[in-house]
Image (spheres, grey):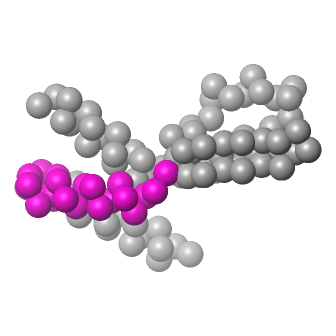
Amino acid sequence: MESRKAVLRQIRKLAESRVNDAVRLAFLSEEELGELAKLDLSAVAEFKRSSNGTVEVKFIDRLAALQWLMDRAEEDPKAQRLYEALEGAAGQVGEEK
Protein backbone atom coordinates (compact mmCIF):
# COMPACT_ATOMS: atom_id res chain seq x y z
CA MET A 1 0.00 0.00 0.00
CA GLU A 2 2.88 2.38 0.76
CA SER A 3 4.24 1.96 -2.78
CA ARG A 4 0.83 2.92 -4.20
CA LYS A 5 0.89 6.09 -2.10
CA ALA A 6 4.41 6.84 -3.32
CA VAL A 7 3.32 6.43 -6.94
CA LEU A 8 0.33 8.71 -6.40
CA ARG A 9 2.59 11.33 -4.77
CA GLN A 10 5.02 11.18 -7.70
CA ILE A 11 2.26 11.41 -10.32
CA ARG A 12 0.80 14.36 -8.43
CA LYS A 13 4.21 16.02 -8.37
CA LEU A 14 4.55 15.50 -12.13
CA ALA A 15 1.07 16.87 -12.79
CA GLU A 16 1.86 19.99 -10.74
CA SER A 17 5.45 20.43 -11.86
CA ARG A 18 6.64 23.75 -13.21
CA VAL A 19 9.02 24.30 -16.10
CA ASN A 20 10.90 27.30 -14.69
CA ASP A 21 14.05 25.36 -13.82
CA ALA A 22 14.10 23.68 -17.23
CA VAL A 23 14.13 27.10 -18.85
CA ARG A 24 16.92 28.15 -16.47
CA LEU A 25 18.87 25.01 -17.46
CA ALA A 26 18.63 25.99 -21.12
CA PHE A 27 20.44 29.24 -20.35
CA LEU A 28 23.11 27.94 -17.94
CA SER A 29 26.66 28.45 -19.09
CA GLU A 30 29.27 25.72 -18.64
CA GLU A 31 30.65 27.61 -15.64
CA GLU A 32 27.22 27.49 -13.96
CA LEU A 33 26.66 23.73 -14.33
CA GLY A 34 27.35 23.32 -10.61
CA GLU A 35 23.84 24.76 -10.13
CA LEU A 36 22.36 21.68 -11.83
CA ALA A 37 21.77 19.80 -8.56
CA LYS A 38 19.61 22.66 -7.26
CA LEU A 39 17.19 22.57 -10.21
CA ASP A 40 13.84 20.76 -10.13
CA LEU A 41 13.77 19.02 -13.48
CA SER A 42 10.93 16.61 -12.72
CA ALA A 43 8.87 18.12 -15.56
CA VAL A 44 11.61 17.38 -18.12
CA ALA A 45 11.32 14.23 -20.20
CA GLU A 46 14.22 15.03 -22.53
CA PHE A 47 16.85 17.76 -22.82
CA LYS A 48 19.27 18.27 -25.72
CA ARG A 49 21.79 21.01 -26.34
CA SER A 50 23.66 20.94 -29.64
CA SER A 51 27.19 22.16 -30.18
CA ASN A 52 25.86 25.30 -31.88
CA GLY A 53 23.80 26.19 -28.78
CA THR A 54 20.39 25.06 -29.97
CA VAL A 55 18.31 23.70 -27.09
CA GLU A 56 15.46 21.20 -27.32
CA VAL A 57 13.36 20.45 -24.25
CA LYS A 58 10.54 17.92 -24.08
CA PHE A 59 8.32 17.99 -21.02
CA ILE A 60 6.28 15.26 -19.39
CA ASP A 61 2.67 15.03 -20.52
CA ARG A 62 0.69 16.64 -17.68
CA LEU A 63 -2.58 15.69 -19.30
CA ALA A 64 -1.55 12.03 -19.30
CA ALA A 65 -0.59 12.28 -15.62
CA LEU A 66 -3.96 13.83 -14.78
CA GLN A 67 -5.76 11.22 -16.88
CA TRP A 68 -3.92 8.48 -14.99
CA LEU A 69 -4.99 10.05 -11.69
CA MET A 70 -8.57 10.30 -12.91
CA ASP A 71 -8.56 6.64 -13.90
CA ARG A 72 -7.29 5.71 -10.43
CA ALA A 73 -9.85 8.01 -8.84
CA GLU A 74 -12.62 5.89 -10.28
CA GLU A 75 -11.11 2.94 -8.40
CA ASP A 76 -10.26 4.68 -5.12
CA PRO A 77 -12.21 7.44 -3.29
CA LYS A 78 -8.98 8.89 -1.84
CA ALA A 79 -7.54 9.24 -5.33
CA GLN A 80 -10.78 10.98 -6.36
CA ARG A 81 -10.19 13.62 -3.68
CA LEU A 82 -6.59 14.05 -4.88
CA TYR A 83 -7.77 14.51 -8.47
CA GLU A 84 -10.39 17.05 -7.37
CA ALA A 85 -7.74 18.99 -5.44
CA LEU A 86 -5.45 19.04 -8.48
CA GLU A 87 -8.31 20.08 -10.72
CA GLY A 88 -9.12 22.94 -8.34
CA ALA A 89 -5.50 24.03 -8.20
CA ALA A 90 -5.29 23.98 -12.00
CA GLY A 91 -8.39 26.20 -12.15
CA GLN A 92 -6.81 28.67 -9.73
CA VAL A 93 -3.64 28.87 -11.84
CA GLY A 94 -5.75 29.49 -14.95
CA GLU A 95 -7.62 32.28 -13.17
CA GLU A 96 -4.36 34.04 -12.22
CA LYS A 97 -3.42 34.61 -15.85
Q: Quadrant of the C terminus?
A: bottom right
Q: Quadrant of residue 35?
A: top right
Q: Is residue 13 magenta-colored?
A: no
Between residue 20 and residue 26, name the one nearer to us. Answer: 26
> Which residue is most to the right?
52
Q: Quadrant of residue 45?
A: top right
Q: Is residue 34 left or right of residue 74?
A: right
Q: Tell me: residue 1, above or below residue 73.
A: above
Q: Is residue 69 left or right of residue 23?
A: left
Q: Tell me: residue 67, above or below residue 1.
A: below
Asked if one can make out residue 36 in the rendered structure from this viewpoint, the answer is yes
Task: Kindly identify the residue that appears in the image at 19 percent across and 59 percent down.
Answer: 71
Q: Is residue 9 left or right of residue 24?
A: left
Residue 67: percent from left, percent from top: 29, 61
Task: Kindly identify the residue that appears in the image at 27 percent across and 55 percent down.
Answer: 68
Task: Kindly identify the residue that appears in the image at 20 percent across and 29 percent down.
Answer: 3
Q: Is residue 66 magenta-colored?
A: yes
Q: Tell me: residue 81, above or below residue 53.
A: below
> Which residue is most to the front?
51
Residue 85: percent from left, percent from top: 27, 60
The chief SS type of the magenta part is helix
Q: Tell me: residue 5, above or below residue 69.
A: above
Residue 53: percent from left, percent from top: 88, 45
Which residues, given as a range, are shown in magenta?
60-80
Asked if one can make out residue 85 in the rendered structure from this viewpoint, the answer is no
